[in-house]
Image (cartoon, rainbow, N blue to C red):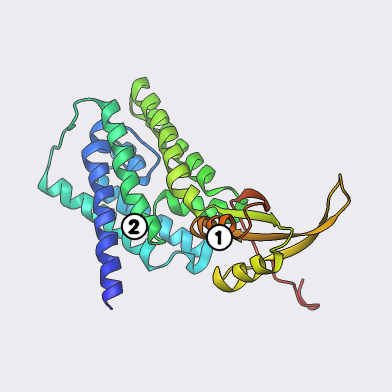
């Protein structure tokens, strides 16, 4: 119970940071930077609703589409933050009507938005949560088009940025596009990049069994062993292959330095892994 309450408080705080970034920096700049809130800023010029109201409507629609296409992949955390974000935006709008730019410069507003929103998104990511919105679109594209999450987020964000051309001048459109590009770099490196796994290939002359045992029983990860023949000397050695996350990779490298610093190790980034179950003879 305490853990659940703590998670709710942390998610609320992270969502509050995101809402503040949108209200104090994104809205005054009029830039539509890769988010549902950015799209809501554009739509507010056509729809007689506040940015928070439009954001709520869009998030509910995306949640419904997400549940239809991806089942229960979107859990309570995504639902909670998707609804909480527009509620907090509405509170800001009520308490601070007519809020203007804090920096007096649209470019600085966008830079501050990217920096601030990244903090909130990073906190949510570490809790295996998201702010909903375009995250849902990215997951749908990832599932059905096998598109990398970072690229899917960037593509949908760029469409939002280009939508500002229907309302604002060229300077704002360019600012929206550049802000979206920079935001994508930050998200891909600091957030989605943290989710990327690593495929580690190890060839050890003397410590193969010890390394395999450590990976299986201490690191609690899986491993596969292949035979690899050296092209120069023709010697056959076993190659240990394991896929680990960021924390496991650091532990594995520390272990290898202590156990077998002379081992030959190659590392590859893995952005997507899928298990395709074998169909029974009666299935199509």
Work out whether residue 153 can be spotted: yes
- Relative to 279, is 14 on the left or the right? left
Q: Which residue position holds label 2?
A: 82
The answer to which of 90 and 102 lies nearer the viewer is 102
- Rendered view: 177 above or below 94: above
Q: Earlier in the sequence, mark 2 or mark 1?
A: 2
At x 23%, y 25%, the residue is 105
**Between residues 52 and 13, which one lies in front from this camera angle?**
13
Per the image, the residue denoted by label 1 is 255
Whole-number angstrom distance, CA of label 2 to CA of label 1: 41 Å
On-image quarter of the N terminus:
bottom left
> At which x and y percent is residue 102?
17, 32
In this rendering, is residue 7 above or below 133?
below
- The residue at the point 70 percent across, 69 percent down is 209
The reply to whether callout 2 and callout 1 are in contact (CB within 8 Å) is: no
Which dot, 2 or 1, sits closer to the camera? Answer: 1
Of the 4 image quadrants, the one containing the C terminus is bottom right
Q: Is residue 98 left or right of residue 107?
A: left
- Which label is found at residue 225? none
Q: Is residue 90 left or right of residue 76?
A: left
Q: Residue at x 44, y 52 (%)?
A: 135
Residue 271 locus on image (x, y percent)? 58, 51
Residue 128: image location, x then y, percent: 41, 61
Taking the view exactly as shown, the residue that stands out farthest to the right is: 234
Question: Residue pushed farthest top?
Answer: 170
Displayed quadrant of residue 87: bottom left
Q: Is residue 50 visible?
A: no
Q: Secondary structure at mark 2?
A: helix
Q: Nearer the viewer, residue 197 or 45?
A: 197
Image height of 176 relative to 20, above or below: above
Residue count near mark 1 (Cα–Cα under 10 Å), binned few <14, some 14–19, many ≥20: some
State the image coordinates of residue 98 (x, y, percent, origin top left).
13, 37
């Amino acid at each position: 119970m305490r853990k659940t309450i703590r998670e709710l408080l942390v998610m609320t705080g992270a969502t509050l940071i995101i809402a503040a970034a949108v209200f104090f920096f994104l809205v005054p700049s009029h830039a539509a930077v890769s988010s549902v809130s950015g799209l809501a800023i554009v739509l507010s010029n056509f729809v007689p609703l506040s940015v928070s109201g439009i954001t709520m409507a869009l998030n509910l629609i995306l949640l419904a589409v997400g549940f239809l296409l991806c089942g229960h992949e979107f859990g309570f955390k995504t639902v909670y933050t998707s609804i909480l974000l527009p509620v907090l935006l509405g509170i800001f709008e009520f308490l601070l009507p007519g809020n203007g730019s804090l920096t007096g410069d649209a470019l600085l507003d966008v830079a501050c938005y990217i920096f601030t929103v990244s903090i909130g998104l990073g906190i949510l990511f570490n809790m295996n949560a998201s702010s909903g919105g375009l995250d849902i679109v990215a997951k749908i594209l990832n599932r059905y088009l096998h598109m990398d999450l970072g690229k899917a987020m960037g593509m949908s964000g760029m469409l939002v940025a280009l939508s500002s051309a229907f309302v604002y001048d060229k300077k704002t459109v360019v600012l929206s596009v550049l802000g979206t590009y920079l935001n994508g770099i930050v998200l891909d490196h600091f957030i989605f990049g943290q989710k990327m796994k690593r495929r580690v290939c190890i060839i050890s002359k003397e410590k193969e069994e010890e390394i395999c045992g450590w990976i299986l029983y201490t690191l609690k990860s899986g491993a596969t062993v292949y035979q690899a023949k050296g092209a120069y000397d023709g010697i056959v050695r076993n190659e240990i292959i394991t896929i680990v996350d960021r924390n496991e990779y650091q532990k594995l490298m520390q272990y290898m330095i202590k156990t077998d610093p002379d081992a030959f190790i190659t590392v590859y980034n893995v952005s997507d892994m899928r298990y395709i179950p074998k169909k029974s003879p009666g299935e199509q």
